[in-house]
Amino acid sequence: MKVNGKILIIDDEASLRQTLARILQQAGFEVTSAENGEQGLAFLQQNPFDLIFMDIRMPGLAGLDVLERIRASHPGLPVVLFTAQPDLNSAVEALRRGATDYLLKPLKPDVIIERARTILFAQQKERRRREIQTQIEQLQVELKALDAEKAEPATVSPKTIPLPDRYLKRGAILLDTYTRRVVVNERAVSLVATSFDFLLVLARHAPDVIDYRTLVAEAQGYQADAREAQELTKWHIHNIRQAIEPDPRNPVYLFNVRGIGYRLVAD
């Protein structure tokens, strides 16, 4: 499936807007740029968009306020926030308010493109699934083919994994580092890209305990102090447990070592 879509960039820094627009346009996306939150909301009312990239810190209407208005008017529209390192607490708050993901500045072109493609691919696949469901009597054959395609990652057998460096298996949990998909007990689960990075670090260290600061450093490339790292990690652990645990309140895969960090079971 070819990944395309309309992307709105909201950032008050002109050079960053222009650079991001060029990167995304070269990757095949249609891009509109807004210089502040007010202009971005106006564009959103006038045109449909599939994805928004937005800075948290902007003069006038702040990023979190813009996010709140977007969630009220377009609850299903993916929004990815940009943040500098001192703004990590704001990034965590944005995730709690419904942001899809966040990226640390300085932004890397390959990361921007990967996030856009991952989010829009999932969006396009879901849109196609809904179209098929509304025409199920006429399109039964196509629906079965799509279901088989969707189920393929979940039925990968550890005995048939061809590339050891691609797949990482820890007990019932299988990570595909190429497609960034997760399978638990032959069931595909969904994780935002940043939470996948945290789970990947935990899996690489399993079954050893990994402390909060090391976890953030390896997953995000950011040196946080102990308190900040613990707060940031807490949200991602919650997200991961919701995805992989049969009962997130009674984890069987991902455990907290109080005051130190977390560990993922290996068997």
Image (cartoon, rainbow, N blue to C red):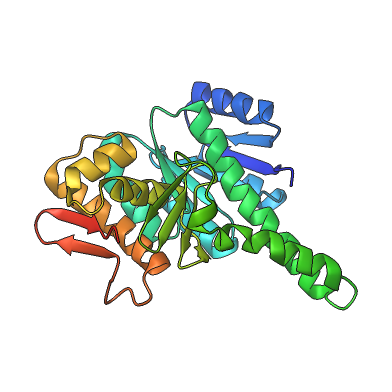
| Relative to 28, 166 lies left or right | left
* Rendered position, 77 above or below 220: below
Question: Nearest the camera: 21 or 156?
Answer: 156
| Relative to 143, 22 lies left or right | left
Q: Position of residue 162 (x, y in %)?
A: 54, 44
Residue pictured at 70% horizontal, 66% vertical: 147
* Rendered position, 152 above or below 30: below
Q: Position of residue 16 (x, y in %)?
A: 50, 25
Residue pictured at 51% horizontal, 66% vertical: 186
* Rendered position, 46 above or below 30: below
Residue that lies at the very extreme toward the left in this rendered image: 259
Is residue 40 something one can see in this rendering? Answer: no
Q: Position of residue 259 (x, y in %)?
A: 9, 57
Is residue 69 something one can see in this rendering? Answer: yes
Q: Position of residue 212 (x, y in %)?
A: 18, 48
Residue 98 falls in image quadrant: bottom left
Question: Nearest the camera: 3 or 68?
Answer: 3
Residue that lies at the very extreme toward the right in this rendered image: 138
* Rendered position, 165 above or below 190: above
Instruction: Give the quarter of the figure containing the C terminus.
Output: bottom left
